[in-house]
Image: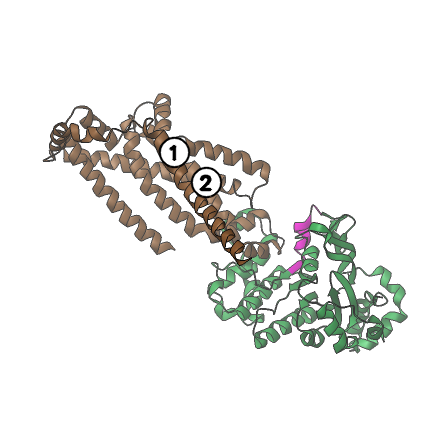
Amino acid sequence: MSELRSSEAVLAHRRHSLYTLLPVLIILSLLAATWRGADIRPMDLFQGQDGMREFARGFFPPDYSEWRQYVHEMYITLSIALWGTLLAILAAIPLGLLSAQNVAPAWVVQPVRRLMDTLRAINEMVFAMLFIVAVGLGPFAGVLALWVHTSGVLAKLFAESVEAIDPRPREGIRATGAAQIDEIRYAIIPQVLSLWISFAIYRFESNVRSAMVVGMVGAGGIGVMLHESIQSFNFAQSAAILLIIVLTSSFLDICSSFLRNGIS
Amino acid sequence: MFIHYEYYYTDVYTMTSKCHDLGLRVSYVGQVLFARAFSSIGKFVMDAIHIENLNKTVARGRKLLDGIDLRVAPGEMVAIIGASGSGKSTLLRHIAGFVTGDAGSNVRVYRQSVQIDGRIARNVRSIRRDVGFVFQQFNLVGRLSLETNVLLGCLARLPLWRRLLGLFPERERALAVTAMTEVGMATHAAQRADDLSGGQQQRAAIARVLVQQARLLLADEPIASLDPRSAVRVLELMRQLNTAHDMTVLVSLHQIDMARQFCPRIVALSQGRIVYDGPGSGLSDDDLTALYEGRAISVAKAAA
């Protein structure tokens, strides 16, 4: 009897170990199947070593001769990011509320959510290329691209924070006979405001990085300069631009986390 | 089976107001006797709360409320008692129109229908202006100041632009100050509601009801999360609302001694049914034990 039970236990243990092994096997086979798709050629890193070394050497020393212009272009990039984010915040407030299940009815929430999904699914760069066709080359196309994409992102974040509110204060306001707009104004907004601000600052920070990239397709700012310097194999200038980008990004990173910590 | 209280429920109000006119104070029993004698007057007096056949069925046929018929006259102060899950909160939430009952359920507040045949009335928000609600967890907006929270009671009276901009008229501000003074919270006006103790928050919630100028106060376990002293303070304020501000009060309570002390009329719920409706003195200790153990209450004894 006890023998039987112990063999059952061993079997159970074996089955258990097979279950834990299964995900590992799945992941390994997935990686194997995509090896070719991703065109992984590790040997090339070593075979082309001389070329790589030459390429890397081109970046040093960085060429700072045009730094005034880089700073000016960085200012344009920051302007694009700021306006893109600001317009997105304005759009995301109503859109976020309309895609929150505890605010709007399902027949509003679902279409608005799908629209926001679409805006998020399409990269800023794609939007930038489309807007360049519509409004011409330059920063404005970048602003529009960031606005549209960020609206989708912020609306989702805003909606999620609205759905997570404590419903009790809201019921307290509803009990006084106040309208739904009052519930939003006095029960929902006070609860989510600090989160919303924190999301908006974070998105501004990441929009600065995005603004550099949308610049590369012609939507103005430092991205254009970077793109041109790489295209013309002027890697010393690229290095200077990249350094400015890294400095600006880290500076904003620090400022934004400082601000967000101050809020929450 | 059940004690029905109908023989005097509405007339107490007429009676009380008549006596007030004459400058008389009459005992509760006196009121009841008077009301019995003039019960025909009752037909013409409107109820503060009139519930007919209120049922609420949830998943797997479980009944949260089971055939509730209840009438409360203007000016009454009524306690609802019962074990947890007996339907006290559910009943109050139905009266405020937060939720709807099954088909056939009707709830009226001061002659206005909150729900008809289990469907919420279209104008429920305007009806709620007359109904103040005090919650167990106070339900204040924690990030707003006490004063703003109290002022929220007047939202339903203000035009949209004032509500959106948060510009409360001087008249309403004065009202809020009076209300905060009345509940003894005026010195805390600028504090965030978050930073107040439970008892203070509950008093603020009562001040909000004062600013709202409600005619009916529904209170859902208002003292369940308070210490004994704050609890007495809050119930005294509710009594003050009942006597000095002519508010009808319907309050659900766990503490039977509190219910007896503050409310002339007690309605006991058990498994969604009204099992007792009458003065607190009619409930024996055995009845209460039965009530909280979910056993059938011997109502014949209560009637005597």
Colour used to depict chain A in the structure image: brown
Question: Which residue is identified by label 2?
Answer: A155
Q: Position of residue A178 (x, y in %)?
A: 60, 52
Q: Quadrant of residue B95?
A: bottom right
Residue A30, disc: 1
What hue represents chain B?
green
Question: Quadrant of the rendered structure where residue A83 is?
Answer: top left
Label 2 chain ID: A
Q: Determine the CA span between mark 2 and mark 1.
A: 34 Å
For label 1, count other residues whose C-alpha is less than 10 Å away and answer few (under 14), some (14-19) or many (20+). Answer: few
Badge 2 density bin: few <14, some 14–19, many ≥20, Cα 10 Å = many
- The residue closer to the viewer here, B238 or B13, is B238
- For the N terminus of chain B, which image quadrant? bottom right
Front residue of this view, candidates A148 and B181: A148
Q: Answer yes or no: do the residues labelled 2 and 1 have beta carbons within 8 Å?
A: no
Q: Nearer the viewer, residue B250 or B147?
A: B250
Which residue occupies 32% across, 52% down? A259
Name the secondary structure under disc 2: helix
Q: Position of residue A32 (x, y in %)?
A: 35, 32
Return the chain for callout 1. Answer: A
- The type of residue carrying mark 2 is Ala
Kindly report which numbered mark, 2 or 1, lies closer to the viewer in this rendering: 1
Q: Nearer the viewer, residue A154 or B142?
A: A154
Asked if residue B122 is among those painted magenta in the image, a careful observer would answer yes
Q: Does residue B114 appear to the left or right of B133 in the view shown?
A: right
Residue at x 65%, y 50% (from the top left corner): B125
Instruction: Please report the residue visible at 61 percent of the width from the left and 71 percent of the height from the top.
Output: B234
- Tell me the amino acid under the disc marked 1: Leu
Span colored in magenta: B120-132
Quarter occupied by residue B39 = bottom right
In the rendered view of the protein, which quadrant contains the C terminus of chain B? Answer: bottom right
Residue A97, relative to residue A133: is it above or below? below
